Amino acid sequence: MNDSRFTIHVSSFNRHSAFGIRHSAFTLIELLVVIAIISILAALLMPALKNARDQARTIQCMNNQRQLNIALQTFANEHDGLLPGGQETAIRGWGSRFDLRDNSMPAGAEDSVLVEKGYLNRQVMTCPMAFLRKRDVDAYFFSIWGIHWAYYYSSNIALVGNVNTADDTAFYGPTLPAPNRDAIRISEVKFPDRTVLTCDHLFFTSFSSVAAISAPPATTAGIGIRVSAIHRGGSGAIASYVDGHVALAPAVQIDSSTALRWGYIPGYLDYPYPSSFQKGFEY
């Protein structure tokens, strides 16, 4: 039977899918337009993504220093108001030393007294923003001093001084302009909201030096603590203060000639350095 109702139109079937929708491939121009749009969107989004990552690292660094501040003050409360001492050699102090090649603890170094006694975890001592710069800093350190290690955070040299090995507390040693004696107790700080306790400082000591600084904001002294200016696009550093608050502070006198990117933030003490250690304190 030759019924036209059952005739299959092959040419029509080949041109259409089973659902009656015609298929067609992208033309070259259409493909190039799509690629161009994706490229433009990526270019617009990349700065925002980088800013978001940097902001996340900044928040993590602030949280680290907040925990570090709490640990230091808890130690002081349990040791007659004295903070743990600073650390420069293999002698144990409050800081944790890191090998910049693999972030491990260098051979022969003692770990932080705060870590050893359970006040906080060692990883809290790692600044996530400074971690990105560790390769360049490692090359610089090795070329100048022949070492591969550093501390990510430092403390106020006026508060931690050197290490009293008898009980790990701070005392003023011969490197500071004062006779050997116990350091100032943290409760004696006259301006706790302006006195830095910890700060970003990728260096081979766990205490920061001081210097006169120009146009210091929020202080009457003109004395700054040296920091690594690695936040806020390389113009600021995070610091925690004796009163417990943590802030992202603008740095001045930034030296960008090396990977260390040293600068200064206000907050040493409120009287000129280097007079007696009564500056900023009351007895």
Image (tube, rainbow, N blue to C red):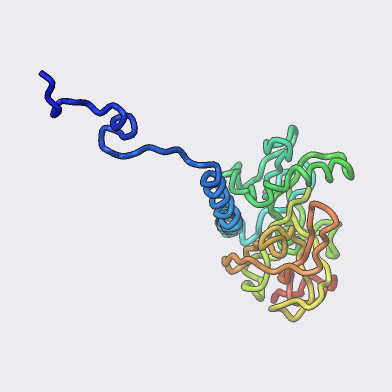
Residue 21 versus residue 212: which sits nearer the camera?
21
Apparent side of residue 72 relative to residue 174 in the rendered image (left or right): left
Apparent side of residue 118 relative to residue 251 in the rendered image (left or right): left
Residue 201 versus residue 244: which sits nearer the camera?
201
Apparent side of residue 81 relative to residue 139 in the rendered image (left or right): left
- Position of residue 131 relative to residue 177, above or below, is above
Q: Residue at the spot x=71%, y=53% of the render? A: 85
Q: Position of residue 180 (x, y in %)?
A: 81, 59
Residue 30 versus residue 176: which sits nearer the camera?
30
Q: Residue at the spot x=74%, y=69% of the render? A: 268
Q: Position of residue 121 (x, y in %)?
A: 56, 44
Q: Residue at the spot x=41%, y=38% of the render? A: 24
Residue sitting farthest toward the left: 1
Q: Residue at the spot x=68%, y=45% of the render? A: 96
Task: Give the quarter of the image for residue 220.
Answer: bottom right
Q: Quadrant of the C terminus?
A: bottom right
Q: Quadrant of the N terminus?
A: top left
Task: Give the quarter of the image for residue 193.
Answer: bottom right
Q: Is residue 220 visible?
A: yes
Q: Position of residue 226 (x, y in %)?
A: 77, 62
Residue sitting farthest toward the right: 144
Residue sitting farthest toward the bottom: 220
Q: Position of residue 5 (x, y in %)?
A: 13, 29
Q: Count of labels shown? A: 0
